[in-house]
Amino acid sequence: MIFRQLFHQGSCTYSYLVASRRGGEACLVDPVLEQVERYLRLLEELELSLVMAIDTHLHADHVTGAGRLSAQTDCVTVMGRETEAELVSLRVADGERLDLDGVTLEALHTPGHTPDSYCFLLGDRVLTGDTLFIRGTGRTDFQGGDPAAQYDSIFGKLLRLPDRTLVFPGHDYKGDTVSTIGEERAFNPRLQVGCVQDYVAVMNGLDLPKPRLMEVALPANRRLGLPPVAPEPVSVLDLPGAYFI
Ligand SMILES: [Fe+2]
């Protein structure tokens, strides 16, 4: 399997390129708009054809490259069926499997950071989006965030995966790249809680500033990063009474 973790410095986002083999089909998970040319170059270098661009959720901190990638490569865009994003060509549900030349991505609905948050399980590894970070978890204080739902997603789904499962998050702000489920259960400070109420109290006490790009990113991502369709240009001569100046 080809598996690449691609970092975007501006938003500390990790995007992932997955393919079964050189020359085969590929997918990109959480592509960033500013990095589209880089992805296209890498796809060409590895002789891969992009068939899917997946967003793990509606992002508030960067604009997705999924729309532009789809326009340039005809790939399918994928998000969870709970998403409010438009223009998504394939909406997945919990437990659904996406096949990529024999590599399977299993969609796990993990609401909490947002109602449309999904993780994707790929054999020995899981792409955790903004649900589980290395020694952290995704914030739950806006965009329909729900710390109790996130507790259920993490404790009821992710931490039930085998301990050796590799954890590849959607962001890292400290330079960490990969962890495991066993490590996060043992050492993630947010997961050292006895019950859901304790977790809710931890998350509600974070008091984080809003993401800098939120006002731009949310409306843009509802259109998968594509610009709004401009209204048909109206000639002044088409307006009623235009000839009667
Ligand atoms: Fe996010």
Image (cartoon, helix red, strand yellow):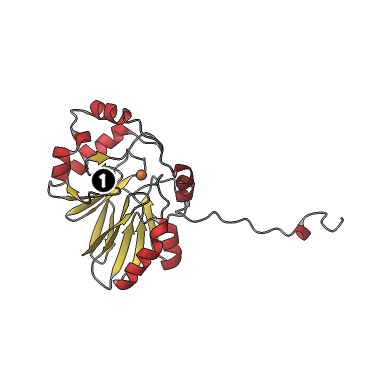
Left or right: 114 as drawn, with respect to 225: left
Image vertical order of residue 232 relative to residue 72, above or below: above
Left or right: 8 as drawn, with respect to 1: right
**Residue in view at x 12 percent, y 49 percent:** 164
| Residue 49 visible in the shown view | no
**Residue in view at x 25 percent, y 72 percent:** 22
Image vertical order of residue 51 relative to residue 63, above or below: below
Secondary-structure class at tag 1: loop
Residue 74 location, x and y as percent?
42, 66
**Residue in view at x 19 percent, y 53 percent:** 125
Quadrant location of the C terminus in the rendered image = bottom right
Residue 152 location, x and y as percent?
25, 36
Give the residue at mark 1: 174
Q: Quadrant of residue 186?
A: top left
Q: Quadrant of residue 239?
A: bottom right
| Residue 181 visible in the shown view | yes
